[in-house]
Amino acid sequence: MQESKDKFSQLVEIMAQLRSPQGCPWDREQTHESLRQHLLEETYEVIEAIDEHRIEDLAEELGDLLLQIIFHAQMAAEANQFTIANVIDSINQKLIRRHPHVFGDEKVDSAAEQIKLWEKTKLKKEGKKSAIDGIPKELPALVRAYRLQNKAAAVGFDWPDINPVWEKIEEELAELREAVERQSESDIQEELGDVLFSLVNLSRHLQHNPEDALRHTIDKFSRRFHAIEDEMQKQNLSFSSATLAEMDAIWDRIKSKE
């Protein structure tokens, strides 16, 4: 534990030195806004290491992400706004407040109960006006829909089982089909969104994250498409000369091998 504290303090000191007048010109020029994209990229690199099970790289990627947090805290400290100590104290207090079953007298027997308690605590003790507040608008739409539905479900706005979810998907698909037949572009967009939102709800009831499921399918498609390109090259075929039937046949062979 002491070693971790010492190394964390060293990291804070290194960043302060980099931002000092005797430090690095690039680091001194940065702002919260200029580092925004770096923060996003480092987050995605952590996710990629997790998805690809590259545990050997995960420590380094987490370090890069931690650097971004230290960087923002240092800039705020220089402007007399807050320090890294304030950042840590904020999350410490939040963790204690949102886990009364660990640090208080509440009783929780499952993860599902914990989620409901978490949301109720945020509403009662943190002054949130709505049960669905706190979801960043910048999130990818699929993730945002999933988080939104989870928050609503945590306060009881949810079907008790999966059967009505299937029915809702069928209903939304029928409405999308009707909109396409009417060739109403505005209705098509709205109904397509309803179908996607319903599928997210299905994934939630199946206890699978839709973002993870879609990312898996994207990776699978990319892998198979690259294999099609390799196979077509071996057969001296090109996309302009090959028929869809020929490409489908190659796809099926690659799929069967998996």
Image: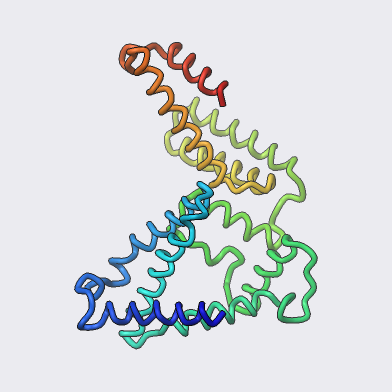
Quarter of the view holding residue 71: bottom left
Query: Residue 196 versus residue 178: which sits nearer the camera?
Result: 196
From the image, which quarter does the C terminus lie in? top right
Image position, residue 204 (x, y; %): 65, 48
Side (left or right) of 32 relative to 47:
left
User: Residue at the location (63% across, 57% down)?
Assistant: 150
Question: Measured from the top left, where is residue 129 in percent x and y?
Answer: 57, 72
148 or 32: which is nearer to us? 32
Identify the image's colour scheme: rainbow, by chain, secondary structure or one colour: rainbow
Q: How many marks?
A: 0
Residue positioned most to the bottom: 80
Q: Is residue 101 above or below residue 153?
A: below
Q: Residue at x 75, y 64 (%)?
A: 113
Which of the 4 quarters of the picture holds residue 76?
A: bottom left
Is the residue 151 above or below the residue 233 in the image? below
Q: Position of residue 111 (x, y in %)?
A: 72, 61
Q: Residue at x 47, y 16 (%)?
A: 250
**Residue 90 vertical placement versus 49 (above, below):** below
Q: Residue at x 34, y 78 (%)?
A: 14
**In the rendered view, would you say 155 is above or below 75?**
above
Q: Quadrant of residue 37?
A: bottom left
Give how far across and how far down residue 81 sits, in percent.
Answer: 37, 85
